[in-house]
Every structure is written in structure tokens, then in C-alpha cells.
Amino acid sequence: MTAQQNTKLRIASASDKPLWDAYVSQHKNASAYHKFAWLEAVKAAYDHSMLGVIATCANTGQVVGVFPAVLMNIPLLGKQICSLPYCDVGYGLADNDKVLNDMHALLAAQMRNVTGKKLEIRGIEQSPLDKIQFENKKVRMLLPLPESSEILLSSFKSKLRSQIRKAEKNGLTFELGTSNVLVSDFYNVYAQNMRDLGSPVHAEKWFKAIIKSYGQSSLISVVYHDGQPIGGGVIIKSGDNASIPWASTLRDFNRLAPNMLLYWSLLSHCADNGVKVFDFGRSTFEEGTYKFKKQWGAEPQLLNWQSFDKNNELIDAKSDAKSGSSRVREIAENIWRELPLKFTIVTGSILRPYISL
């Protein structure tokens, strides 16, 4: 038989979670977003349909590939499939290119079945690139971790170590865990910070869904000043890697360096608990957040997000962009920053499920 005849493809269901996660945990290109928990959380919080593809060997039943995806029905824009929404990456994982291409083709067929407008795959560039190819591009920042926080701390430049100590000398403390109290404390910081950035917020139920789905593979850190939460972040883990999808601090307290203690609390935990690679998340090459992540020793990996039309043909990024959209976005952000916090939380929670970024 051919390789194609020996492989079975299907849309994964909740009962496939153990098989799915076992495959993800051992794949060298997997991220924490590839765990079935991300699909579960999207369904639980926002009721978007899970469209993850699982490929198995017809003879043995062994998993040979997974491709996480979500069907989103966006008002005015129609249906689209995204791999994956609300995060940086969501590409397929497979034993070989044949299986990967077959899973992609099945997702394209699913899009046609639901009369979808677009299939978006948030991939990465696997091969090393010259730095000139990174200019003005989106990258994710990856930091290899040593076997302990003590070794990690000693690897930092003296300036970075002093900034961590500065936060401690300023009386800042942190707490790690996954309790509802920590979720709420994190959310209060996150919601205010996102309003100040001019961006709609996720609903608090989204973060509760993440914590519930990931369980012990998730962790929250909240930084406090005199009992007030002023910084917070969430990490999720898979195998020996971890990602931080969200981190926020209150700008009125930035002089106290809460960001330094926040990241150190999570990095030290990861180093002491078997994590080998820490994903700081998306930044624009050489811009502000890139430089913040770079100081910890993280290196860039180019993100390669691609969109495909109903014929499974690649949509050119420039032709897909709407004229003047950046100016409209800038105006919207400026208005959003001036709105009352409670209003932005309520409104943002309504809008955010349909914004895949």
C-alpha cells in the first residue's frame, strides 16, 4: 500500500486528547499551544468549533500527525479557519511532509464545506536566517534554559541582575499558582494594561478556561506592591517547553520594576522544573518588546503566517491588507484608551472572541 492509503485522517474529538497530547509532547517542533487544551479552552470560553485534524497509521492506530485548528464565524466577515487563534503559532506537526500536506488539504476541504473565506496557518521558519531577513518582521523570542535558576541567574549580565534585585528592594513580592484569586488579580492588571494600550480585552472566563484545560501545565504569577496586584503573567507548558501568552504591568508602577520580577519569577520556576526552552512570544524585530526579551538572552525565530483562499491558494499579504487600515486602527486605539475601564471590559469581552490575534 502507499503511504496515503496507510494513513487515516479525521477531525479530532475530545476522546482523542490523550493520543493527541502524547504525540505533541514528543514532537521536536511542538509548542504549548499545540496541546489539545488550547482547542478545549477556545470551545469552552468562546464556543468556536474545534477542527483539529489527527492522522493515524491505518495498520497500527499510532498517531503520525496533528494539525490544531478552529472554525470561527466572524460577523460581517464570514467563516474562517485559524491555526491557531489568540496565539502566535498553530501549524501542523507530522512524521513527514506527506502527512502534513494531507492534513492541510483536509482543512482546506473543510473550509470549502462550510463556505469559509480563509484558512490561516501561523507557522514558523525552521531554518536559520540572516538577520537582514528579520527586518520589520514578526518574530518569536526563544530562550534555552539551563538546569537550574541559580545557573540561569549567573548567566545574566550584571545590569539585568541588578534590575531584578531593584524590584525586590522596592518591596515587590510575587505569588505563583492557579487559584481563582490569582486569576482575578492577574485579570485586573491585564484589563487595565490592555485598555491603556488601546486594545480590547479577553473575557475573564477565557483565562479561567485556559487554567482549567491546561491544569498543572499552566501557571500564573502575580506581582504585588503593598498588597495591590501591579503585574501578572500566565505561562503554559508542553513537554520541556513553556510559553507566556500574556504578561502585563500597571504603568504607574513601572518605576519599581515589576516586569523584571514578574519574568524572573516565571523563568526561575521553569528552569527549576525541567523546562528547556522558554518562548517569550511575538515581537517586531529590533523594536521595544524585542529588546526587552533580548536582554534575557532570547533569540528570534521568524514567524511565517500564511492565509489560503477557498481554492487553497496562497493569499498575498499585501493584497489582503485593507487600504488605510493602519490609520483606522490608530484612531480606534486612541479612542479606546480614553474609555472607562469597566466599559472596555464589557465591550472587549464581546468583541474579543472574533479577533483572532
Image (spheres, helix red, strand yellow):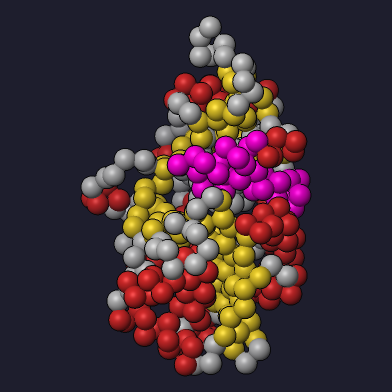
**Residue 355: x percent and y percent?**
62, 51
Asked whether 148 falls inside the magenta stretch, the response is: no
Residues rendered magenta in the picture: 19-47
**Residue 283: x percent and y percent?**
42, 59
Q: Is 78 or 88 nearer to us in this picture?
A: 88
Q: Residue at x 39, y 63 (%)?
A: 146
Magenta: predominant secondary structure element? helix
Viewed as shown, does residue 110 lie left or right of 125?
right
Q: Residue at x 75, y 70 (%)?
A: 180
Residue 246 in which image quadrant: bottom right
Q: Residue at x 23, y 47 (%)?
A: 130
Residue 181 vertical position relative to residue 10 in the rendered view, above or below: below
Q: Is 331 or 261 nearer to us in this picture?
A: 261
Q: Is 5 or 147 nearer to us in this picture?
A: 147
Viewed as shown, does residue 72 lie left or right of 225?
right
Q: Is 54 or 206 nearer to us in this picture?
A: 54
